[in-house]
Image: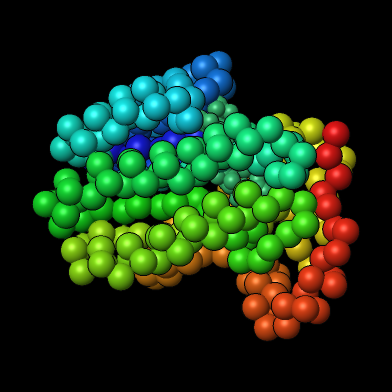
Amino acid sequence: MVAFITGASSGIGAEFARRFAEKGYDLIITGRRKEYLNRVAEEIQTASGRTVTTIIGDLSDPKHLTDLVDRVRNSKDIDVLINNAGHGLKQHFIQDDISNPDILLDVHLRAAMHLMHAVIPGMTERKRGTIINVSSIAGFSPTASDPTYGATKAFLTFFTESLHLVLHEKGITVQALCPGFTWTNFHEKLGIPKAEQSHRGILRWTTADKVVDESMKGLQNGTVVVIPGFLNRIAMKIVALVPRRLYYRMLKGKTLRRR
Ligand SMILES: NC(=O)c1ccc[n+]([C@@H]2O[C@H](COP(=O)([O-])OP(=O)(O)OC[C@H]3O[C@@H](n4cnc5c(N)ncnc54)[C@H](OP(=O)(O)O)[C@@H]3O)[C@@H](O)[C@H]2O)c1
């Protein structure tokens, strides 16, 4: 049994790696930061005794993605695929160089789709498998701060639900995990200091540990779209009910402070 996890050098991906190793899976984990990824691998190998294979590379690099896809397609024992790798953008779409949103599409969507496409035939043959796509609550409602990030996550959630409709009959469990604000390396990479990573209104911050807890519970009870945190679930329900004109007025000028 092997779990293949993209973006496991920190945060939610590293936590998923720990959990699946505890459950007896060997791991293949990926990321760009060699030192971070190796540290996670060593920690897990020592704690669980499982085999952890690390693959360093950038998912927006077509050659790296092709290598990963070949590896997944040729493997006979990948029972779990977690498309977790992701990042935000420092600048708003209208000010940014177009190459940056392009890279985000490659990492959040192209890489996830190619890896799913490669893993599904084997899972179908074995009549078992689990695919978790780490999406976000940002995919449920437009924001003034970043049109690209939320739109990619909306795509990923929609895509995951649509796949569920077909794959659940083949014994494959599919989940879109939609966390809210989570303390990981994500926001620091955007230049948002730890001191500013605190609760905002109804939207609370949480830990990667709690996010993965809720994902695991979701796998057990068959929840396809998992939104960790009671208040996040309420907030998303409210957002869905607010008339769009009012919503636009509420969000006007609300941008996340960046450095
Ligand atoms: N933190 C939040 O508030 C939050 C909320 C909702 C959803 N999410 C989603 O949760 C997922 C995990 O993020 P996190 O919060 O755990 O942040 P994180 O600690 O920064 O982890 C992100 C992971 O993705 C990898 N990654 C990013 N860009 C990559 C690229 N171009 N190629 C290969 N790997 C790449 C990073 O590895 P390297 O840096 O080593 O490449 C890292 O392992 C992301 O999809 C994110 O969108 C996060």
User: Left or right: 256 with respect to 83?
Assistant: right
Q: Residue at x 44, y 36 (%)?
A: 6
Give whichever of 175, 220 is nearer the camera: 175
Q: In this view, does 120 lie to the left or right of 103?
A: left
**Residue at the outermost top position:** 35
Q: Where is residue 154 in the image (x, y as percent from the top left)?
A: 54, 60
**Residue 44 visible to an observer of this rendering:** no
Relative to 21, residue 215 above or below: below
Which color scheme is applied?
A: rainbow
Quarter of the picture containing the C terminus is top right
Identify which residue, 122 or 246, lies in the foreground.
Answer: 246
Above or below: residue 258 compared with residue 162: above
Ligand 1 in which quarter: top right
- Establish if 97 lies above or below 202: above
At 33% from the left and 41% from the top, the residue drawn is 115
Q: Where is the N terminus found, in terms of image quarters?
A: top left
* Vertical position of residue 145 compared to residue 73: above or below: below
- Residue that sits furthest to the left in the current view: 125
In the image, taking residue 85 as reference, residue 101 lies left or right, namely right
Q: What is the x, y in percent for residue 142?
A: 68, 63
> Where residue 66 appears, x then y in whole percent?
32, 28
Residue shown at the point (83%, 39%) measured from the top left = 258
- Numbered marks: total: 0
Can residue 6 be seen from the camera position used here? yes
Q: Give x and y (percent) for residue 192.
A: 81, 38
